[in-house]
Image: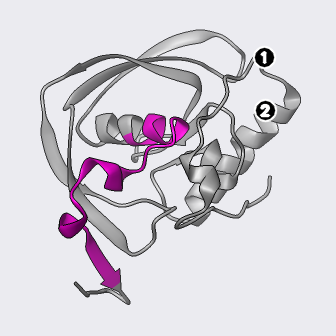
């Protein structure tokens, strides 16, 4: 496993749409392993392949209940509403209150290429939506007004 460089800021790759993974290969399995190691090393709760410069529809998430790997994830259902602060490994030092669905159902493939569905509420629902957005070139700051973004520097707010 390897820790990969996380793309940040205005890197144009972050605005590109990721391509579906046609089949799960050893290279895809290694990429999932690298993504998990990179996410944990950066103290994140989710990471999309595009964030390490790879335009494939791959996501890893761990909100504290263990690693979830998603290949070609699609959000099937959304319900309810929640509003909370979000940050992003690709936008260090920035956060904002984002409104998202409180519950989502997602269909994806696992690393064996088998389809499965996962339902998430609260933080998991937020992470699923945040990471699927990445696959479509959408960042959390696209869901808020620029004046609502909080900029943090060395642990202190700096508006």
Queried whether the magenta region covers residue 146, the answer comes back as yes
Q: How many marks?
A: 2
Q: Which residue is drawn at 80% across and 52% down?
A: 1
Q: What element carries label 1?
A: loop
The correct choice, above or below, for 144 with respect to 22 in the image is below
The residue lying at 72 percent from left, 44 percent from top is: 54
Which residue is more in the foreground, 117 or 135? 135
What residue is at 36 percent from the left and 87 percent from the top? 153
Q: Which mark is residue 28?
A: 2
Mark 2–mark 1 distance (CA, rounded to whole Å): 8 Å
Segment tinted magenta in the rendering:
130-152
Pick the residue in front: 141 or 59.
141
The answer to whether residue 79 is left or right of residue 47 is left
Crowd rating for badge 2 (residues with CA inside 10 Å; few <14, some 14–19, many 20+): some
* Label pair 2/1, CB-CB below 8 angstroms: yes
Q: In this view, does 13 lie to the left or right of 46?
A: right
Q: At 39% from the left edge and 46% from the top edge, which residue is drawn?
A: 63
* Disc number placed over residue 23 in the picture, else none: 1
Q: Position of residue 148 (x, y in %)?
A: 18, 65
Q: Characterize the local packing of mark 1: few (<14), some (14-19) or many (20 or more) Cα atoms within 10 angstroms.
A: few
Sequence-first tag of 2 and 1: 1
| Lateral position of residue 97 relative to residue 62, left or right | left
Indicate whether 6 appears above or below 102.
Answer: below
């Amino acid at each position: 496993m390897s820790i990969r460089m996380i793309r940040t800021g205005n890197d144009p790759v972050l605005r590109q749409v990721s391509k579906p993974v046609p089949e799960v290969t050893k290279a895809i399995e290694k990429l999932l392993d690298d993504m998990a190691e990179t996410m944990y090393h950066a103290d994140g709760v989710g990471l999309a392949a595009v964030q390490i410069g790879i335009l494939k529809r791959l996501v890893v998430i761990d909100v504290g209940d263990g690693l979830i790997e998603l290949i070609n994830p699609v959000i099937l259902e959304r319900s309810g509403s929640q509003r909370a602060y979000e940050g992003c490994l690709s936008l260090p030092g920035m956060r904002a209150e984002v409104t998202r669905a409180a519950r989502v159902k997602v269909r994806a493939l696992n690393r064996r290429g088998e389809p499965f569905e996962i339902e998430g509420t609260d933080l998991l629902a937020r992470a699923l939506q945040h990471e699927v957005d990445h696959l479509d070139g959408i960042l959390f700051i696209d869901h808020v007004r620029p004046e609502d973004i909080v900029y943090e520097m060395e642990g202190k707010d700096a508006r």
